[in-house]
Amino acid sequence: MGAQLNPMDYVVGIDLGTSNSVVAVVEDGAPVVIPNKGGYTTTPSIVATSESGTRLVGHIAKRQSVTNARNTVFAAKRLIGRKWDSPPARTVQQSCPYTIVEGPHGDVRIMMRDQVYSVPEISAFILQEIKLVAEQYVGASVQKAVVTVPAYFNDNQRQATKDAGRIAGLDVLRIVNEPTAASLAYGLDAKGEGTVAVYDLGGGTFDVSILSIEDGVFQVISTAGDTFLGGEDFDERVSGWLVERFRELTGVDVRQDRMALQRIRDAAEQTRCELSTVTESSVDLPFLYTMPNGDTHHLQETLSRTQLNDLTKDLVDRTIQICRKTLEEANLSPRDLDDVILVGGMVRMPLIQESVTKFFQREPCRGVHPDEVVALGASIQGTALTQGSTDLLLLDVTPHSLGIMISGGYFHELIGQNTTVPTSASHIFTTVRDNQTSVKILVLQGESDKAAENELLGEFILSGLEKAVRGQVEVDVTLSISADGIVSVAARDLKTGREQSITVTATSGLTEEELSALVSQSHDYMLDVKKNEELERAQLQVRKIVEEVEALFPEVRDVMSGTSFGRDAISKAEAVVERAKQDLQGSDVRALGEVQESLDRTLSMFRGVVTKTKLN
Ligand code: AMP
């Protein structure tokens, strides 16, 4: 462990993935991935509520997803920062076994056991688990983190991710783009100069970024992607094929049966992963469907790698088309690149490796685990930030243009796509009516000329303007994008130099009040979790000593019952065991601690008696 670090300085790098999350920390100058309780380096980004109302996160949630599909949320990252009326929300609604509903701010909310959660809350549950994993590993409280997001995430998605961190009790020092983190992990800065493409295909998102690295400065010069293209879509293809095969063979359409569908989806993913190493794989799902008359149907199929490639080739081609477009935007050809990095679990698929190698005309970098590379890079960045290192300066670009709506419903761009962040741009507004005291401004992100086709980030109302003839009041509005890619607005009355008050109306996600309430709720929950863990630990220890004492009783009775002193000692020991059993029924950690001390004394006396008898 990094013993020389002050506990307050622990900063972890978190890859909050669509299907899996990973946490890393820099120890003795080198980044390492922290394994979770089960020893796995990745934790499924899955949250569930059990029948008894217990919150489950990670592997434990994944394991029960088939039997509790309605109350198990996966791939929430696809919904983070999304609006209810957006196409992704509709797609999720049609394909997911859990229920999504419209939130009070036009955002998406998720239902588990009749309780409604915001998406940042769901992500916070995952981050809390990750935080616990890290805390157990470093043996201290972990508060600071660098969290990664796909480079293509817009402001709402970044802000919602930061909110998730806050709810989980983390101080998110920086939101870093996943491809940037991946390049850091490959230590590409040490090579000096170069141009790198990062191809990242995970469970739910795809992005490709072109980075230029010069003197340790990483600059994302172009980035593009699809926040709705990943392993899940490949699984859908295989599941669809299996459902169709089942229908052909049995006449039954299992799409209406959530449980059967979830089993098929799980089997589809497993088979698909197997086909990365073997050329043929079988799917075996006994008792998949029971007919109303009690007859049961099983699903038994074989899928070859060639069939899988046929089913998913167009998805792979889509990623390559995006790569082509991104290179064109950067005015580069594949030959201009020095390296290609593969990131995400999906890059193990042979068809993807072949297609990437063919398109970029080179073998991709190998060495760092594609699942771990992003978290490792994030931890490197976190350490650089807390130790004030200037050697590692990250420069990213904004993946979307930022602007405002102007009359006629048009979009007026203030900051162009691929501008290096942090950046800011100003625009001067004048009043259009006499005595107008406020102006409403819509801030949007996107590439369409039409405002309605872009993402609305917020409505900003400038109020308290001086009463004057129209056109005379001029307000300078400055839009800024931070190094995290998060947008903020400032406004100044040009004539008086006075700062204007700005009201921000949340258009998606959570309001400040909701957020504060969730932060304190989550804090209480974590206290409960920690208290429970302490209780379980105390109970475990007491139970163990009770067993040991009870095992020695017969022998001790044989030796000691002959004297009244001995009989007295035995009945005292019996009373201690009895008290321990009673305390085990309760939840008083202190009482358990006290009884453990008495048990310890009894046990050592018993051991002494037994050893002495054996010696005699
Ligand atoms: P990530 O979001 O980076 O954690 O990637 C998760 C995705 O990678 C899931 O869709 C997995 O099915 C997929 N994946 C993991 N291992 C393999 C493998 N060996 N072959 C193909 N896909 C894989």
Image (spheres, grey):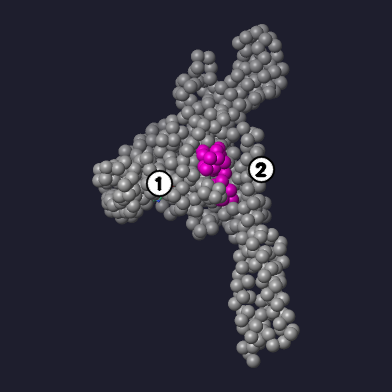
Q: Which residue lies furthest to the bottom in this view?
A: 616
Q: Quadrant of the C terminus?
A: bottom right
Would the CB of label 2 be found within 8 Å of ligand 1?
no
User: In this rendering, is residue 505 above or below 93?
Assistant: above
Q: Position of residue 351 (x, y in %)?
A: 32, 46
Would the CB of label 1 be found within 8 Å of ligand 1?
no
User: In this rendering, is residue 430 above or below 390?
Assistant: above
The label shown at residue 520 is 2
- Local crowd at mark 1 within 10 Å, few (<14), some, or many (≥20)? many
Q: Under tag 2, what secondary structure?
A: helix
Tell me the kind of residue under disc 1. Met
Tell me the kind of residue under disc 2. Ser
Q: Where is residue 384 in the image (x, y as percent from the top left)?
A: 60, 47
Q: Position of residue 547 (x, y in %)?
A: 60, 72
Residue denoted by label 1: 259
- Local crowd at mark 2 within 10 Å, few (<14), some, or many (≥20)? some
Q: Is residue 509 visible?
A: yes
What span is colored magenta in the figure?
A: 110-131
Q: Quadrant of the N terminus?
A: bottom right
Q: Please name the residue shown 65% across and 20% down the image.
A: 462
